[in-house]
Image (cartoon, coloured by chain):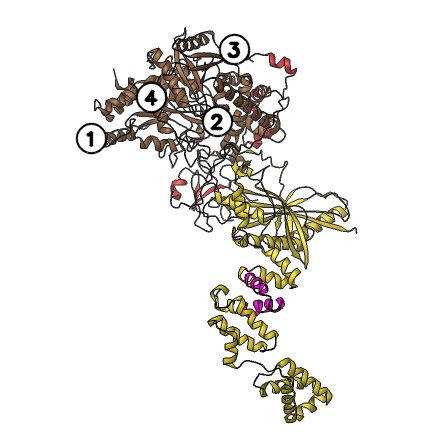
Chain colours: A red, B brown, C yellow
Amino acid sequence: MPLIKIFFPVRIYLICGRMEIIMNIDIKHIAKLSRLKIEDEKLDKFEKNMKSIVDMVDKLPEINDSLSLLDPTEPMTLRSDIAVTNKFKREDLLKNAPEVQAGCLVVPKTVE
Amino acid sequence: MRLYEKTASELSEMLNNKECSAEELCKDVLDRINETENKVGAYVSVSYESALENAEKIDTARQRGEKLHPLAGIPIGIKDNISTKGIRTTCSSKMLENYVPPFNATVINKINNAGMTILGKMNMDEFAMGSSTETSYMHLTRNPHNTDCVPGGSSGGSAAAVAAGEAIVTLGSDTGGSIRQPAALCGVVGLKPTYGSVSRYGLIAFASSLDQIGPMGKSVRDVAMLQSVICGHDKYDATSKVMEYPDYASNLKENAKGLKIGIPKEYFGSGIDDEVKDSVMKAIKELELNGAEIKEITLPSTEYAINTYYIIASAEASSNLARFDGVKYGYRAENYSGLTDMYEKTRSEGFGDEVKRRIMLGTFVLSSGYFDAYYKKAKRIQNRISSEFSSAFEECDIIATPTVPASAFKIGVNINDPVKMYYNDVCTVTANIAGLPAISLPCGMDSKNMPMGLQLIGNKFAEQTLLNSAYTYEKICGGFDALSKAL
Amino acid sequence: MKDYEIVVGLEVHAELNTESKIFCDCKNAFGLEVNTQVCPVCMGMPGTLPTLNEKVVEYAIKMGHALNCNINRICKQDRKNYFYPDLPKAYQISQADVPLCENGKLEFMVDREIKTVGITRIHIEEDAGKLLHDDSFAGSLVDMNRCGVPLIEIVSEPDIRSSAEAKAYLETIKSILQYIGISDCKMQEGSIRCDVNVSVREKGTAEFGTRSEMKNVNSFSAAVRGIEYEAKRQIELIEAGEKVIQETRRWDDAKGMSFSMRSKEDAQDYRYFPEPDLLTIVVDEEKISEIKNSIPELPNAKIKRYVTDFKLTQIDATLIAEDMEKSALFDACNALNICKPKNISNWILADISKFVNETGKNISETKLTPELLCAIIEKIEKNVISNSAGKTVFMEIIENGGNIDEIIEKRGLAQNSDTDFIENLVKEVFANNEKSINDYKNGKTNALGYLVGQCMKASKGKANPGIVKETVTKMLEAE
């Protein structure tokens, strides 16, 4: 693995006194959640890449700032309840669909 | 001098004065494309017919004495992640190789209303994920200054086209530096506007809270003119801002006297090439000689910016790209058994490795048990970065940094090292994280005769100040001479 | 066997009857030709963005007030990520940790008792499309018309203790949704759906048992059947020494059974995070008050009031309360304080309902007013006219309006309650009907009715039938 050129001072690791490394990212589980299949030959390389990326993102320090995921200083302007009809034709909207039948999209049999 | 060598503002005057026609201009640029594309590869698709049609239409309108927008008839390239009705919009991905949107992005409607001539769609890193345009499924784009080098990314095609004369101006998109970095590596001007000032409706999303469409061109005035066309509140984009958007180009003026320029030490560390540091400092000194005040500032959370960026961007991307499932549009695998298999095969075959990596990372940081540790932590740092900039802007009008640590690297050297590739963005991601406007300007060639970039960052919605500062620097340079001499 | 208690929580999804969808301006309508009420936004085309419909927020807050909730005037939307063909974006825009409304309660009557159920939350979200299957077809078909139809999800606390309570809860929710005009609640069109959470525990235990969630409950009576089946199933498991698994099950009403839906390993990880394409929702305090003031007294509150204050039966109270015009009339009449509530309710439920059903007219379209109705009832209560004379007056009034006294006078409807007059009348009839008197003495009790009828006939219907009957009875006994 080539030497990674760290562009910012390395001191942070010494101050924090730790470097968290996720040893076991469940690649298979993450792939399943993402509906991705990683071929067996590529799995090893992928796992290494993922680990080094996770190492990188894992270097965030612990901070105790309060966090609100709400921002009332920038409130959203809501849309008026007015319907607009006949903007698009069905055939135009389904033009890019891989498979269409009877005006519907076709997917493999999906029963609950 | 050929028409493609001129700036949009020069051509606008020429068209107005009937010194040339829109058709002549369009033909000249299309000729240039034919001459250069095999070396540069900036385009995914060129729309010869519709471009000429528009040019003719504009000429007819002008002959009739109709009042036209200053940019009417100016040829423009559009990054291929911006939806163009009836024109393939691929995001340089196999997943959307044959996708034709049934609607225009809002910015395209604005471009059309201004009468600009859309030349075609520009090559990019797949789904805007990358810093070199090497992850494009279509083909490589090469740097017009040295075709062994990358043009940067993800708006590599947009930047290269301007530098090669294959478009007068282009639109790119910027999520972590994707306009500014290629602009720097190709020696052109590229602006990432304030988040919320340009509608994202129709921009195929990468990271919703960071993406912005922005203008690229050979001069500050060109970029300012194009910015005025594309900016504005859009009721179809809830994140777009309602406010008075000035006519940036008309109000362009030099502002060096009393301009307070902040220099953050964190952007001049050991990771930045000495030549880049020197040329950026030289540029800043020039501004100082013209009356600007330099202030040394500190933005301490800068060192966490890349990590923060990758957490937030990947998280949003993993969700935004989930819609590519082979059901409604785009690629669908040919052989599969059952729904889950169809999803997995479609997405695995349709996406390249970098996209898959980012989706996996995003899924991981959002997954149960990790949300607090990654996503929330990143949000906290984001708030810190934003407030550090706010404080800085109480003392400064603009902030100056290098755009990229080094000039363009050779094609192929970084593609197998994602982390090394990510560190290309160190100077640019903070503007996206804080939602600030930032512009890259050519500030000289290095010893390899490759362009370097000066980045100026402005306060939220203070594009006029930012563009004025850029304009001032451009004036000091005597113009940018942005076209590559190598082609 | 031990004594078990059923614990039920209900999640109701109701489609709101706004003009446009929640995140785009497509028409919000049911039953249209497949994929004709869609646009790039609700289809999840690349590059599209959601814009939130203000009516959806308003309607959700209205329901929040109706269910006594706290309104979170500052809130947000979140993405719920999962893959399914009826979900175009592969995420549903919903609300996770900060719903629009929280911590409410609903009071309603069950078996003449007042039951209170806590409301955990109400939040807004978008509906998904429809999957269509056919045995003859190898795949499944997706219709996206329903994508983006606005939904509110109402989650109750697990306070329900029987299937009867569950049904009453659901019916009350439905009546409120219709009353405040935010949903048409057509279960057959799927505009109201519910998921049922059931667990059991030994009576007296503080802890909750493991619960199962049941989907595909398509009617309120199916909910009753589902709850009873599921409770029984769980009790049988526990009695057999086994554990109840926390899982999602599918209710099959035709088979009368529930089936486990967990076909594989793990539960869904929805990876909720704040929707980055939308900003924070902030609702003005003024707007919240305005919405609150626009809510009329709700049917469940009315039912409680009618039973408690006016001593109506729960059935009568419900029938009146659920109809806005009938309850308005009932309340207006009672406010006049002229006649008995019971009589007013009888008139509304019998004669007035009959008229409304037969003519198709609303009460408000007739000439009947609370004053007029009460005047008629008062005359009857005071024995000025008989019940049947009252009906005659009523039919005249409801069509033509007018003055009660004048009508009584004109039609000669006044009844005679003079006891002397009636005694003489009865004596006369007795004189002419010895046979009947003898019949009665010999055990034929219906002779009484006959004699009363003769008296009424002789008086041309004017005699007060009650007093006649009393007098006839008295005089028969004296014979």
How packed is label 3: few (under 14 Cα within 10 Å), some, or many (20 or more)?
Answer: some
Q: Characterize the magenta stretch by its predominant secondary structure.
A: helix
Instruction: Using the numbered discs, state the Cα–Cα distance from disc 4 to disc 2 in whole angstroms.
Output: 24 Å
Q: Which chain's residue wears label 3?
A: B
Q: Quadrant of the C terminus of chain A?
A: top right
B182 relative to C153, above or below:
above
Q: Secondary structure at mark 4?
A: helix
Question: Which residue does the numbered mark 3 point to in the structure image?
Answer: B269
Q: Amino acid at mark 2?
A: Leu
Q: Is residue C305 above or below residue B117?
A: below
Tag 2, which secondary structure?
loop
Residue at the disc numbered 4:
B222
Q: Does residue A26 appear in the picture of this structure?
A: yes
Return the disc, 4 or 1, that comes first in the chain's sequence. 1
* C177 horizontally vs B47: left or right: right
Q: Are marks 4 and 2 in contact (CB under 8 Å)?
A: no
- Magenta segment range? C327-352
| Alpha-carbon span between mark 1 and mark 2 | 43 Å
Residue B452, image x, y percentages:
41, 12
| Image position, residue C352 (x, y; %) | 54, 68
Residue at image location 49% in from the left, 64% down from the top = C364
